[in-house]
Image (cartoon, helix red, strand yellow):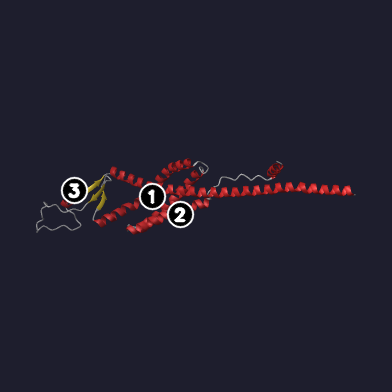
Amino acid sequence: MRRFALFRQAMLRLPRPSLTPMPRVPARMVLLSIAGLWLCYFALATLRGYIVGLEFQSALFWRRLAVALASMAVTAAVWPLRRLLDSRALWMKIAAVLLVSLPASMLLAQINQSAFSDIEEQVVAKIGEREGIRIRRDEAGNVLVDVPGPPPSDAPAPPPDVPQAAPHVKTVAQQEAEASTALTIDQQTARESRWRQLTDVALGRYFLLLAWAALYFALLNGEQARAAERREGDYRRAAKAAELRSLRYQINPHFLFNTLNSLSALVITG
């Protein structure tokens, strides 16, 4: 009982460990993870473009780089919102990530579509030229796709004495034939196609944002584990110091008692 009281007294005299703040992922590590994610996407997208042989690689390269930098900025802007949930339960973190990533992914998809809108028509026209398809717009803004087809069999052959038109000059019959083989894509269909493309890109960005959120939570768990190890070490050192102090408190009375007993014996013996 006496030893317990001495140990308790030693513990009370020890300086209490200060309350450590909530462990956070260092800002440098967060920014490096964001840059690594989008630079990896940029490298893979560029490599894919060279493999499939896309046109206008130089223009696509710089636009793709601008999109990657803008994506880094948007992801870094979302990070403070996620940092507010570091001390929350896991299910709250997951729900917040699923909700916050939706508008962020739509914003990233809109940035991607705006960056490539001016060169998209050039790429489509180049592909159509290679495939023998001409893509144009009429006065109403509808997209017309001229599909080459065989000349009509019932078209009368021109008389031999009639001069032929130049190859680049189209006759009325040729224009009517082309009009009959042209596919018309109205503005409503074009808008729906753009929305489908935007949704497809947004889903891809949504997956990338979720992947970065998982990486961020893994880094956060690592920081919390290291902070717990440091606290455990502090408590172990404090307990060891308290034990040593308790032993010292037990030894000191013994020395005092022995000293007093020796003095008493010397007094008695003169």
Q: Earlier in the sequence, mark 2 or mark 3?
A: 2
Residue 74: horizontal and vertical position, in percent?
A: 45, 48
**Tally of numbered tags:** 3
Cβ–Cβ under 8 Å for marks 1 and 2: no
Determine the residue located farthest toward the right in the rendered image. 270
Q: Nearer the viewer, mark 1 or mark 2?
A: 2
> Mark 2 Cα within 10 Å, few/some/many (few <14, many 20+)?
some
Nearest the camera: 12 or 95? 12
CA gap, disc 2 to disc 3?
A: 52 Å
Residue name at image x 83 percent, y 49 percent: 262
Query: Three-letter amino acid code at disc 1?
Result: Asn
Q: Quadrant of the N terminus?
A: top right
| Element type where label 2 sits in the image | helix
Cβ–Cβ under 8 Å for marks 2 and 3: no
Q: Kindly identify which residue carries mark 1.
A: 112
Left/right of residue 102 with respect to residue 30 in the rendered view: left
Residue 36 circle label = 2
Q: Nearer the viewer, mark 1 or mark 3?
A: 1
Q: Kindly identify which residue carries mark 3.
A: 180
Nearest the camera: 173 or 195? 195
Query: Three-letter amino acid code at disc 3?
Result: Ser
| Element type where label 1 sits in the image | helix
Q: Earlier in the sequence, mark 1 or mark 2?
A: 2
Query: Three-letter amino acid code at disc 2?
Result: Gly
Q: Nearer the viewer, mark 2 or mark 3?
A: 2
CA gap, disc 1 to disc 3?
A: 36 Å
Left/right of residue 162 with respect to residue 54 in the rendered view: left
> Mark 1 Cα within 10 Å, few/some/many (few <14, many 20+)?
many
